[in-house]
Image: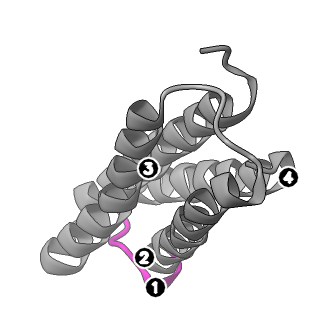
Amino acid sequence: MILWFTLVQVGIAVLAGVVAMVAGLLGRRPGDVTVGSLALIELLLIVQIVVAIISPFAGNPPSGSLLEFWTYLVSAALVPVAGAAWALIERSRWSTVIMGVAALAVAVMVWRMHVIWTVQLA
């Protein structure tokens, strides 16, 4: 995977996570910005799924375990959807905090996927 794309994903996820957690701890309910940030993370993960499918055919195979990579990618793709759905259903300040935690978890998973694809040796 391309380093800059990974850094953009991680940066957006961390920023969204921090904003959502601070808003939740200040007692605010999830707003359009926090739900929208999870939607942006999800969109970037969908792009990453397409890139991960195409890359091996373009001569860029992963350096690590494909099973581990796809497990992280599928998990990372499900977490924002679940967090946003819960936030929209419950609309409490704690659902905003959970959205923040979900975004931070996705940031960690995206970085791990980058390591698996590019720098991990077998």
Dot 3 or dot 4, earlier in sequence: 4
Query: In the drawing, does residue 103 fall left or right of residue 98?
Result: right
Residue on which disc 4 sits:
4
In terms of image quadrants, where is residue 114? top right
**Looking at the picture, how far across and down is residue 98, in whole percent?**
30, 51
> Could you tell me if residue 25 is visible in this image?
no
Query: What amino acid type is highlighted by mark number 2?
Result: Val
- Residue pictured at 42% horizontal, 76% vertical: 35
Give the magenta range: 28-33
Dot 4 or dot 2, earlier in sequence: 4
Query: What amino acid type is highlighted by mark number 1?
Result: Asp
Query: In the drawing, does residue 26 fall left or right of residue 37?
Result: left
Residue on which disc 2 sits:
35
> Answer yes or no: do the residues labelled 3 and 1 have beta carbons within 8 Å?
no
Separation (CA) of disc 3 from disc 1: 25 Å
> Answer yes or no: do the residues labelled 4 and 2 have beta carbons within 8 Å?
no
Separation (CA) of disc 4 from disc 1: 27 Å
- Residue pictured at 64% horizontal, 37% vertical: 62
